[in-house]
Image: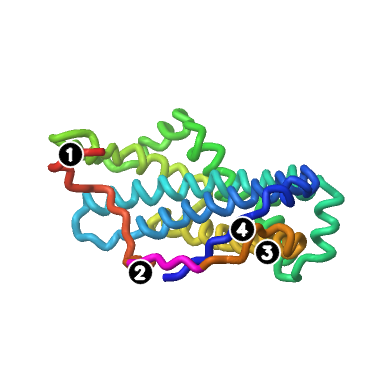
């Protein structure tokens, strides 16, 4: 696989108006983190095992990545609200010169975040803020037996699955999700859709910025870098349970 390495000219970047420069850096950081979270969501989304323990482990791990992705998407929208839309000079210039696709993506994001949505709810109650009362309130809705898995050797393979089941149940009730299906599948579809829009917007925003300050923004021409032994994206998986017989990190 080939990627292209390029360097930004620091002097040129420093000459960009401060608010625009800082917004560019923040969008680049956001783009990275959304992509990292998407990797985790996709690579842990495998519930095909016949072993209930393995499936529970994957559900818990996938839900963690979904919660983290929700937080990043919500904070990304806050970033646009505070540092793009409120900066009239920046946002108006962007709207006048950006591709139609970018403006359509912004419209879709505005529509989604302008109403009650899963991303905001997960972020506020499950991603970074714990609500013991909401988690405990769903205890009566779970089966009589609560699942947990304890590793003999160390804590690496210990999973208190009942806690994740309670968190899932809270979302099922609050958003009227289909109880006959895995609620994570419904959340997965919605978050992936929003993340793809955000990812595409961020990429086009970066392209817009580089085109605006081209060629001075570049320190030197792009250099192709060959990366060997790259796994196929669809073949990568992140398991919950692992063999720790040779120790941990």
Q: Are the residues at dot 3 and dot 2 in contact (C-beta closer than 8 Å)?
A: no
**Badge number at residue 207:** 3
176 shown above or below 223: above
**Badge number at residue 224:** none
Q: Where, quadrant-wise, is the N terminus in this rendering?
A: bottom left
Q: Looking at the image, is mark 4 or mark 1 earlier in the sequence?
A: 4
Which residue, as the protein is rendered here, is positioned at the far top?
133
Q: Which residue is mark 2?
A: 232
Q: Looking at the image, is mark 3 or mark 1 earlier in the sequence?
A: 3
Position of 127 with respect to 51 (left or right) is right
Q: Looking at the image, is mark 3 or mark 2 earlier in the sequence?
A: 3
Q: Camera-side residue: 14 or 154? A: 14
Other residues around mark 2 within 10 Å, as few (<14) / some (14–19) / many (≥20): few
Q: Looking at the image, is mark 2 or mark 1 earlier in the sequence?
A: 2
Which residue, as the protein is rendered here, is positioned at the far front?
220
Position of 14 with respect to 243 (left or right) is right
Q: For marks 4 and 1, give the CA distance.
A: 39 Å
The residue under the point 24% across, 40% down is 147
- Report the mark closest to the observer, 3 or 2: 3
Q: Camera-side residue: 210 or 181? A: 210
Q: Is residue 225 magenta?
A: yes
- Res 80 visible: no
Q: Which residue is mark 1?
A: 247
Position of residue 237 measured from the top left corner of the image (x, y, whole percent): 32, 59
Residue range of the region highlighted in magenta in the rendering: 224-228
SS under mark 3: helix
């Amino acid at each position: 696989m080939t990627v292209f390495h390029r360097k930004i000219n620091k002097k040129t970047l420093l000459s960009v108006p401060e608010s625009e420069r800082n917004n560019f850096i923040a969008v680049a950081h956001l783009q990275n983190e959304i992509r990292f979270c998407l990797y985790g969501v996709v690579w842990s989304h495998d519930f095909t095992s016949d072993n209930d323990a393995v499936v529970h482990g994957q559900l818990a791990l996938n839900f963690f990545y979904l919660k983290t992705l929700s937080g990043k998407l919500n904070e990304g929208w806050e970033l646009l609200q505070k540092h793009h839309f409120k900066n009239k000079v920046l946002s108006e210039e962007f709207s006048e010169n950006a591709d139609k696709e970018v403006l359509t993506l912004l419209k879709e994001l505005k529509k989604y975040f302008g109403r009650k949505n899963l991303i905001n709810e997960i972020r506020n109650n499950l991603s970074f803020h714990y609500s013991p009362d909401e988690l405990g309130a769903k205890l009566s809705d779970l089966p009589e037996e609560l699942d947990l898995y304890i590793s003999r050797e160390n804590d690496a393979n210990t999973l208190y699955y009942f806690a994740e089941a309670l968190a899932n149940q809270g979302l099922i009730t609050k958003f009227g999700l289909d109880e006959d299906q895995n609620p994570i599948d419904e959340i997965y579809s919605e978050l992936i859709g929003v993340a793809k829009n955000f990812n595409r917007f961020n990429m086009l925003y970066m392209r817009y910025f580089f085109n605006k300050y081209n060629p001075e923004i570049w320190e030197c021409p792009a250099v192709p870098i060959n990366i060997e032994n790259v796994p196929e994206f669809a073949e990568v998986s992140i398991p919950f349970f692992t063999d720790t017989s040779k120790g941990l990190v």
